[in-house]
Image: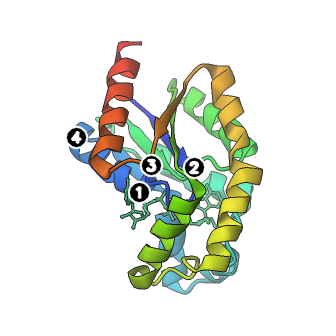
Amino acid sequence: MLNIILSGAPGSGKGTQSQFIVEKYGLQHLSTGDVLRAEIKTGSELGKEIDAIISKGNLVPDDKMYGVIKNYISSLPKDCKGMIFDGYPRTVAQAESLTQLLKEYKMEAIMIDLLVDEQLLIQRLIERGKISGRADDNLNTIRHRIAVYHNQTEPITEYYLHQGNYFAVNGNHTVEDVFMQIERIISLANKI
Ligand code: AP5
């Protein structure tokens, strides 16, 4: 089974590359951002709380995210070929919980980190913001999301480096080129 943590700053291409991976390898895709936005759409009290956090570009608390991940893993089909975690973990505490949870199922994951220059991230998200309708795709919130990424999410790199399952990808290139780099990593990881 191949489990991939697809990490990277906002706009680094996690969602885009996840689609390619799903198509080629048939993995199950969990985008925590999509799950949270779906909860907002229901208009529930929880959705309102989440909306207030996401629209400011902050992270939803770890304990709430843990519930999402736990439910997801426990509801996977038996013939699941593996998972892509798109946007999870985003804190070291989340990384530790995920390792623990995967261990319970006798599973592991590799981390693929999409590295993209900051100016390019901003350009991509501003461009997407013209059509996405996402409350967090505006310049001020994008800058804040990137700062949150540096402060809270980047430290997970060290965590996975220590575990020996960290792979970096230069995400500044075209979508196709980035996917080729990911394919190489996956074929390497499958041989390990
Ligand atoms: P989430 O939805 O995960 O947003 P994000 O991390 O900010 O990432 P984006 O969706 O903006 O970008 P992406 O990396 O997926 O890039 P994409 O492929 O879309 O999370 C939203 C919020 O939810 C968080 O801020 C937080 O509040 C909350 N949240 C989520 N997970 C959480 C967690 N675990 N804990 C706590 N809170 C959590 O591409 C972006 C654009 O660039 C697109 O227009 C695309 O077409 C374009 N593009 C992509 N790749 C390329 C390329 N190679 N060349 C040119 N253009 C490209």
State the SS at label 2. Answer: loop
Q: Which mark is residue 172?
A: 3
Q: Earlier in the sequence, mark 3 or mark 4?
A: 4
In x, y percent, where is residue 64? 68, 60
Q: With respect to residue 81, does 134 lie above or below?
A: below
Assess disc 1: are there few (<14), some (14-19) or many (≥20) residues with their C-alpha within 10 Å of its C-alpha. Answer: some
Quick one: 36 or 79, which is closer to the camera?
36
Circles 2 and 4 in contact, beta carbons < 8 Å: no
Circles 3 and 4 in contact, beta carbons < 8 Å: no
Instruction: Look at the numbered disc 2 and say if its residue's Cβ is closer than 8 Å to ligand 1.
Output: yes
Measure the C-alpha gap from mark 3 to mark 4: 22 Å
In x, y percent, where is residue 147? 72, 60
User: What residue sits 67% from the left and 69% below the top?
Assistant: 143
**Residue 25 relative to residue 65: left or right:** left
* Residue under pointer 4: 24
In x, y percent, where is residue 9? 58, 54
Measure the C-alpha gap from mark 2 to mark 4: 21 Å
Q: Earlier in the sequence, mark 3 or mark 2?
A: 2
**Residue 23 relative to residue 86: left or right:** left
Quick one: 37 or 46, which is closer to the camera?
37
User: What residue sits 77% from the left and 52% below the top?
Assistant: 151
Measure the C-alpha gap from mark 3 to mark 2: 21 Å
State the SS at label 4. Answer: helix
* Residue under pointer 2: 88
State the SS at label 1. Answer: helix
State the SS at label 3. Answer: loop
